[in-house]
């Protein structure tokens, strides 16, 4: 049994003592009430009560995300790529061989596309179905993290860890995104938690199921986005071997065999798709598949080169509001504490730290990469908050219980509703409305549509057709000189590169400066008149034929 954390009042410099104590007490009673005069909680909780509380948090996370899931249009470019690719591949009859605008899109494995395609098959091709897999993955992650924390540190710590993760800002944003990041983090964080459970178990009692379940989780993450899901659990285990005292921890040989077995299982899960695609497409596929890993070390990856400190402010924002308690939670870690709860929490801190170091040293940096830091940090903060100090008066325990029952769901509701309001007050992408304008004006025949020097993959999704990206003026002239009416989306500053007299301006978005233009067919040159004089033209030099 963990001892209560002392000196709670001085946890966060600059934050009022009453606020710190109140927020720390609120989650401590999620799961059951305290009658007057009862003894304060210990970190442990009955297995059934802890599981019910964790599953309730996960179910609440899922249900609160659903009502507004399809309200906003897809955000380009990141969120547009994946639904557009999934819909096109399904439409053309090759769901596991992804393409976008007729071009192969092999830089990501197929799992996220396949999950979206399953949702499209059941619910239709729309934003709700495109985002549903991320919501389900997020709820599953909340449940897995909570159950793993409860097994090591007690049921109440598991409930609080699940609630901390579910109510953090970055988690709330990414569970509503049609993007493979949540599936990757589900596989990675689940593998880290399962391997940590194996690590902290007493010698001779380490569960074999933990490492093979971790292997399945890593295989899931590998098929979602790539091999980084193998690297981060390996780094956590290596750091744990270096930091945790030798007494009670596994040997290097045991850790190597456990992770080796898990990694082999993960590769067995992921390998069939790669081998099938390699047999089908040959060297062209392997160059893309292996080239995707270059962005971890090479600085030429487009648009993502940033400072090694890039993730410091990103993490601070993504882990709101719980980042306020992170310094004190980390300061409360005890390397010498041999209890399973303390060692599990230490390993979770090492998981977050090594993942942070991994992506900070990578040449590719993107804000959503910080999502993988949140689950282990939620376990650390949850285990720190969960113990309730003894000696509180009965009236305070009753007030704490009433506040907890009201505030816990209110926090999740505020996160769900508030995010929608914030998103709508920011830039709402205009591309769904542009697609509707095209469909209203193009007539019975589908007109070709292209984008000039822009990345707007959501247009392919909304128009249910290929919308190629035209990168340079020569290709633009070739597209516009084709037969029939044509539509083009371009930036206002590229207006001068377009032919005069043929375009009509259908829509303009002030926030992005993008224009939707309709081009009429190019006029055919008039046939030459008899004697070489064009109709209405001047006679040729020399007076023309005599």
Image (cartoon, helix red, strand yellow):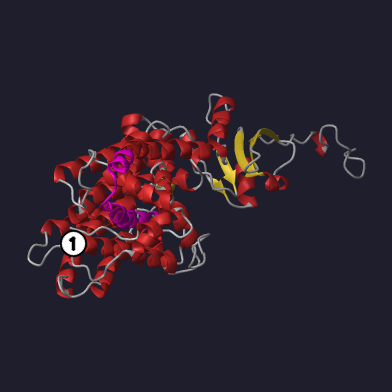
> Residue 415 location, x and y as percent?
42, 40
Q: Residue furthest left?
A: 204
Q: Nearer the viewer, residue 472 or 192?
A: 192
Q: Which residue is mark 1?
A: 340
> Residue 101 location, x and y as percent?
47, 44
- Residue at 43% across / 41% down in the picture? 84
In the displayed structure, 88 sits above or below 320; it is above
In the displayed structure, 303 sits above or below 170; it is below
- Residue at 21% across / 51% down in the picture? 42
**Residue 512, magenta (yes or no):** no
Inspect this view and state whether residue 46 appears. Answer: yes
* Quarter of the image where the C terminus is located: top right
Dominant secondary-structure state across the stretch colored magenta: helix
Q: Residue furthest right?
A: 543
Q: Nearer the viewer, residue 332 or 293?
A: 332
Side of 361 where 231 appears, left or right? left
**Residue 374, magenta (yes or no):** yes
Q: Nearer the viewer, residue 384 or 19?
A: 19
Q: Which residues are magenta?
A: 371-400
> Residue 97 location, x and y as percent?
34, 47
Using a 10 Å C-alpha cutoff, classify the residue at mark 1 as few (fewer than 14 neighbours), some (14 to 19) or many (20 or more).
Answer: many
- Residue at 16% across / 65% down in the picture? 258
Inspect this view and state whether residue 319 appears. Answer: no
> Residue 72 location, x and y as percent?
48, 35
Task: Provide the secondary structure element on which disc 1 rests.
Answer: helix
Number of labelled discs? 1
* Quarter of the image where the N terminus is located: bottom left
């Amino acid at each position: 049994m963990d001892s209560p954390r002392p000196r709670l009042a001085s946890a966060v410099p600059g934050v009022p003592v009453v606020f710190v104590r109140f927020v720390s007490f609120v989650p401590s009673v999620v799961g059951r009430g305290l009658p007057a005069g009862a003894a304060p909680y210990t970190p442990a909780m009955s297995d059934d009560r802890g599981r019910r509380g964790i599953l309730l948090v996960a179910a609440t996370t899922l249900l609160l995300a659903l009502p507004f899931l399809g309200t906003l249009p897809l955000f380009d470019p990141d969120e547009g790529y994946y639904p557009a690719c999934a819909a096109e591949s399904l439409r053309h009859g090759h769901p596991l061989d992804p393409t976008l605008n007729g071009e192969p899109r092999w830089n990501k494995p197929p799992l996220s596309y396949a999950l979206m395609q399953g949702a499209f098959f059941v619910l239709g091709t729309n934003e709700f179905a495109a985002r549903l897999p991320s919501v389900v993955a997020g709820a599953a992650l909340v449940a897995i993290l909570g159950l793993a924390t409860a097994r090591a540190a007690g049921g109440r710590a598991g409930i609080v860890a699940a609630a901390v993760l579910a109510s953090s800002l970055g988690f709330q944003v990414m569970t509503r995104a049609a993007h493979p990041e949540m599936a990757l983090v589900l596989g990675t964080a689940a593998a880290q938690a399962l391997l940590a459970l194996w690590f902290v178990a007493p010698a001779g009692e380490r569960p074999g199921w933990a490492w093979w379940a971790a292997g399945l989780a890593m295989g899931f993450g590998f098929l979602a986005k790539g091999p980084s899901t193998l690297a981060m659990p390996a780094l956590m285990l290596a750091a744990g071997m270096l930091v945790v005292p030798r007494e009670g921890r596994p040997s290097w040989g045991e850790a190597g065999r456990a992770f080796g077995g898990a990694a082999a299982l993960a590769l067995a899960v992921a390998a069939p798709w790669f081998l099938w695609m390699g047999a089908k497409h040959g060297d062209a596929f392997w160059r893309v598949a292996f080239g995707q890993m270059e962005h971890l070390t090479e600085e030429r990856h487009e648009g993502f080169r940033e400072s090694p400190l890039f993730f410091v402010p990103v993490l601070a924002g993504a882990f709101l509001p719980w980042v306020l308690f992170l310094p004190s939670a980390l300061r409360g870690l005890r390397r010498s504490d041999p209890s399973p709860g303390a060692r599990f929490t230490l390993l979770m801190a090492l998981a977050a730290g090594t993942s942070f170091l991994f992506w900070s040293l990578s040449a590719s940096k993107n804000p959503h990469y910080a999502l993988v830091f949140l689950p282990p940090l939620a376990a650390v903060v949850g285990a720190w908050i969960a113990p309730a100090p003894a000696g509180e008066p009965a009236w305070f325990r009753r007030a704490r219980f009433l506040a907890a029952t009201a505030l816990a769901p209110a926090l999740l509701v505020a996160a769900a509703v508030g995010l929608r309001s914030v998103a709508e007050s920011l830039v709402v992408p205009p591309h769904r409305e542009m697609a509707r304008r095209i469909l209203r004006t193009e007539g019975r025949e589908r007109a070709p549509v292209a984008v000039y020097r822009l990345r707007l993959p959501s247009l392919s999704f909304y128009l249910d057709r290929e919308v190629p990206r035209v990168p340079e003026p020569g290709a633009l002239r070739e597209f516009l000189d084709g037969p029939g009416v044509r539509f083009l989306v371009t930036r206002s500053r590229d207006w001068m590169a377009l032919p005069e007299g043929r375009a009509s301006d259908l829509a303009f978005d002030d926030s992005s400066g993008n224009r939707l233009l309709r081009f009429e067919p190019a006029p055919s040159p008039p046939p030459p008149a008899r004697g070489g004089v064009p109709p209405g033209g001047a006679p040729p030099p020399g007076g023309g034929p005599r």
